[in-house]
Image (cartoon, helix red, strand yellow):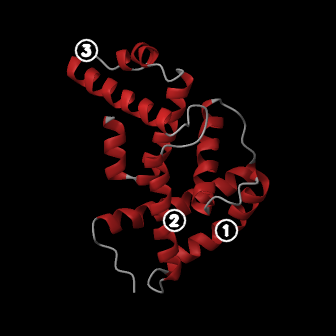
Amino acid sequence: MYIARQLKKKNIAEYLLYMWQVEDIIRANNLDIDKIRKNIIEQYGSDENSKKELEKWYSELIDMMRSENIQSSGHLQINKNVIINLTDLHNELLSSTKEPFYNAAYFKALPFIVEIRQKSGKTDEPEIENCFDTLYGIMLLKLQKKEISADTQKAIGEITKFISLLANYYDKSIKGELKLD
């Protein structure tokens, strides 16, 4: 909860990837708060108030996952809303003549995005979501210490730069510092 709160303020892209990981952690513990308490919450030191807050947060996420029927796959609406907001901002940035660096980063990543969309078959999802799916998948591969090819690393590098730039623009937008057309 604390990490999520800090990441949401600091970097929306890292926040979203973290929240997707939390969804998977909840699933790995069978949406069972007792398992989450034992396997996760108890690992957070001895501050009982923090543990209670963390347990409440996980319980609320579990309830949302059940009510949204995403116990085995999918993402919470709160996380989908982040994708929607980022996609809207992405479209605004592409339409603006004031941010040529963003357009350049997007067009540099675009061939990789197109390839990812074709390989995954998820062409009905927004491109931004495809990028996050890819970044999350790579994160999981790294956690499993699996090898990542040089071509994939190159693609991830461009997508990471692009999503990082989008996250920076999102931060500026939230702070009211972004002026497009």
Question: Could you tell me how far apart the alpha carbons at marks 3 and 2 are, in whole angstroms?
Answer: 41 Å
Q: Quadrant of the N terminus?
A: top left
Q: Of 143 and 30, which appears nearest the observer?
A: 30
Residue 150 at x, y percent in the picture: 74, 50
Residue identified by numbered label 2:
87
Residue identified by numbered label 1:
110
Q: Earlier in the sequence, mark 3 or mark 2?
A: 3
**Callout 3 secondary element:** loop
> In this view of the protein, can residue 157 be seen by the observer?
yes
**Residue in the picture at 73% in, 64% down:** 114
Few, some or many residues within 10 Å of mark 2 (<14, 14–19, 20+): some
Residue 63 at x, y percent in the picture: 42, 31
Amino acid type shown at disc 2: Thr
Q: Earlier in the sequence, mark 1 or mark 2?
A: 2
> In this view of the protein, can residue 22 be seen by the observer?
no
Residue 2 at x, y percent in the picture: 31, 36
Instruction: Mark 3 vs mark 2: give the one in front.
Output: 2
User: Which dot marks residue 46?
Assistant: 3
Few, some or many residues within 10 Å of mark 1 (<14, 14–19, 20+): some
**Callout 1 secondary element:** helix
Give the quarter of the image for residue 34. top left
Q: Quadrant of the C terminus?
A: bottom left
Q: Of 53 and 31, which appears nearest the observer?
A: 31
Q: Is residue 181 above or below residue 155?
A: below
How many labels were placed on the picture? 3
Q: Is residue 133 above or below residue 170?
A: above
Amino acid type shown at disc 1: Leu
Q: Of 46 and 38, which appears nearest the observer?
A: 38
Q: Earlier in the sequence, mark 3 or mark 1?
A: 3
